[in-house]
Image (tube, rainbow, N blue to C red):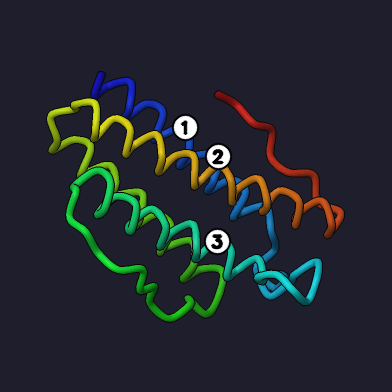
C-alpha cells in the first residue's frame, strides 16, 4: 500500500510541477478575474495545503490554518511546492498506513488536484496548452 501511495504522490508531483513550469515566470502575477488568486498565489496555496493537510490528516497533529507569506516569484514558488511534496513524501515513508492515514493521503491529493485543475484553466486563459495529464 505504501508503494502505491508513493507512486500516486510522485505522479501528482510531476504533473503539478509541469503545470507550474508551463506558466512563464513573468506571468505568475496573472489572474483571469479580479476576484481570484494570481497564478502564484494559487500555486503557493497548493504548497501550503500539502503541508497543512499532511499535518492534520496524515500525521494527525492538529494545526490551525496559518499560511506563510506568499512566495514572491516563480522560482521561489516552485521551490516551495517541491519542498512541500518532499515533506509529504517523508511522512508517507514514515507512517504505517492505516485507514485514517490512507484517507488523509487521498484527501491531500484531492486538494492538490482541485487547485491544479484551476491552474490549468489559468494556463488556457493565457493561451498556453497545459501539459498532458498522465496517470
Provide the residue designation for mark 3: 43
- Is 54 above or below relative to 44? above
Q: Position of residue 24 (x, y in %)?
A: 70, 63
Task: Please say if the residues under marks 1 and 2 sit with CB atoms less than 8 Å apart.
Answer: yes
Q: Residues within 10 Å of mark 2 (few under 14, many from 20)?
A: many
SS of the residue under disc 2: helix
Residue 90 is labelled as none
Residue at (37%, 26%) from the top-left corner?
7
Q: Earlier in the sequence, mark 2 or mark 3?
A: 2
Residue 131 falls left or right of residue 68:
right
Provide the residue designation for mark 2: 15
Count up the numbered dots: 3
Name the residue nearer the viewer: 9 or 98.
98
Residue at (36%, 49%) from the top-left corner?
85
Name the residue nearer the viewer: 46 or 111.
111
Q: Position of residue 44 (x, y in %)?
A: 50, 65
SS of the residue under disc 3: helix
Q: Earlier in the sequence, mark 1 or mark 3?
A: 1
- Is 64 above or below relative to 90? below
Q: Position of residue 134 (x, y in %)?
A: 60, 26
Viewport quadrant of the N terminus: top left
Residue 24 falls left or right of residue 71:
right
Provide the residue designation for mark 1: 11
Residue at (80%, 70%) from the top-left corner?
33
Amino acid at each position: 500500500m505504501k508503494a502505491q501511495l508513493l507512486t500516486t504522490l510522485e505522479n501528482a508531483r510531476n504533473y503539478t510541477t509541469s503545470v507550474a513550469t508551463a506558466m512563464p515566470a513573468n506571468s505568475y502575477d496573472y489572474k483571469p478575474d479580479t476576484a481570484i488568486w494570481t497564478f502564484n498565489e494559487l500555486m503557493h496555496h497548493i504548497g501550503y495545503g500539502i503541508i497543512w493537510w499532511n499535518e492534520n490528516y496524515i500525521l494527525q497533529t492538529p494545526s490551525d490554518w496559518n499560511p506563510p507569506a506568499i512566495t514572491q516569484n516563480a522560482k521561489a514558488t516552485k521551490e516551495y511546492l517541491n519542498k512541500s511534496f518532499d515533506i509529504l513524501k517523508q511522512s508517507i515513508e514514515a507512517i504505517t498506513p492505516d485507514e485514517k492515514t490512507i484517507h488523509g493521503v487521498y484527501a491531500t491529493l484531492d486538494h492538490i488536484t482541485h487547485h491544479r485543475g484551476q491552474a490549468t484553466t489559468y494556463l488556457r486563459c493565457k493561451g498556453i496548452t497545459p501539459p498532458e495529464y498522465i496517470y
